[in-house]
Amino acid sequence: MMYTLWSRGRLLGESPLDFVRCLPRLRVGFLHPTPLGEKLLPLASGVTPASLAFSKVLQDSNADCPDEQWHSLPEYADYQSACDEEAALALELRGPDGEVIPTEDIAVRDTEFLIAWSEERAQHDAATIGALDDEDDVLPWESSEDDFDEDALIAELEALSADDTDGWRQREERPWMHYQLQVKLVHDWSIP
């Protein structure tokens, strides 16, 4: 079953919203854009990169930027601009019958950006962990008091991956699409 994404009466794309459900009322799936969608979806997906850039500046300037001055940062202006561009699209979700489905929020995510960002984060985290060479530095997941059995954990993970009753392997082999559609429904039953 396909659901469609619209902006001011213009079709931007469609999605089966078939990702595994993790939270109530949240539905997620890859978005297959129309030619018009290809042009407008960068505007719809710009909030995440702008938000992350603004967060990074706030984190990096922790003590250098008092709370009352963060709104004057250029990254904040970029974030506000991205939010305004997304809001101007007036996104709406429609069901297979063409009826509008009530939503609290509709977000378009750029999958390629998210993958690149997570790889960059992983490299940063690995470098940070590698810099901890003092034996007194204990990471939150490390503890000399725990009876952590690494072999048992690996065996459990291997057993889970061998059990493919939910079709995980099939989902993992799907090609990545450029965009994801994430919708927060007003009513959980709107999309069965």
Image (cartoon, rainbow, N blue to C red):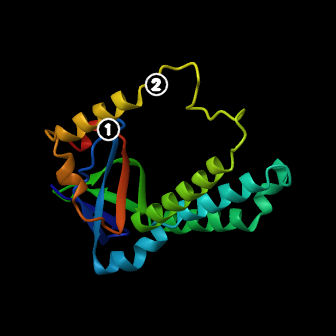
User: Is residue 174 left or right of 64 when viewed as pictured?
Assistant: left
User: Which quarter of the rendering shows the C terminus?
Assistant: top left
Q: Nearer the viewer, residue 154 or 15?
A: 154
User: Is residue 40 left or right of 72 when viewed as pictured?
Assistant: left
Q: Residue at image x 70%, y 65%?
A: 75
Q: Position of residue 19 (x, y in %)?
A: 27, 49
Q: Position of residue 89 (x, y in %)?
A: 45, 68
Q: Position of residue 29 (x, y in %)?
A: 29, 55
Within-10-Å neighbours for mark 2: few <14, some 14–19, many 20+: few
Q: Position of residue 189 (x, y in %)?
A: 25, 37
Q: Nearer the viewer, residue 109 or 96?
A: 109
User: Is residue 14 left or right of 73 when viewed as pictured?
Assistant: left
Q: Are marks 1 and 2 in contact (CB under 8 Å)?
A: no
Name the amino acid type tagged 2: Phe
Q: Residue at image x 49%, y 60%?
A: 119
Name the amino acid type tagged 1: His
User: Is residue 178 left or right of 143 when viewed as pictured?
Assistant: left
In the depicted structure, whether residue 13 falls above or below residue 64: below
Q: Nearer the viewer, residue 185 or 172?
A: 172
Identify the residue position indicated by label 2 in the image.
Answer: 148
Element type at mark 1 = loop
Q: Nearer the viewer, residue 51 or 9?
A: 51
**Structural distance between the alpha carbons of marks 1 and 2:** 42 Å
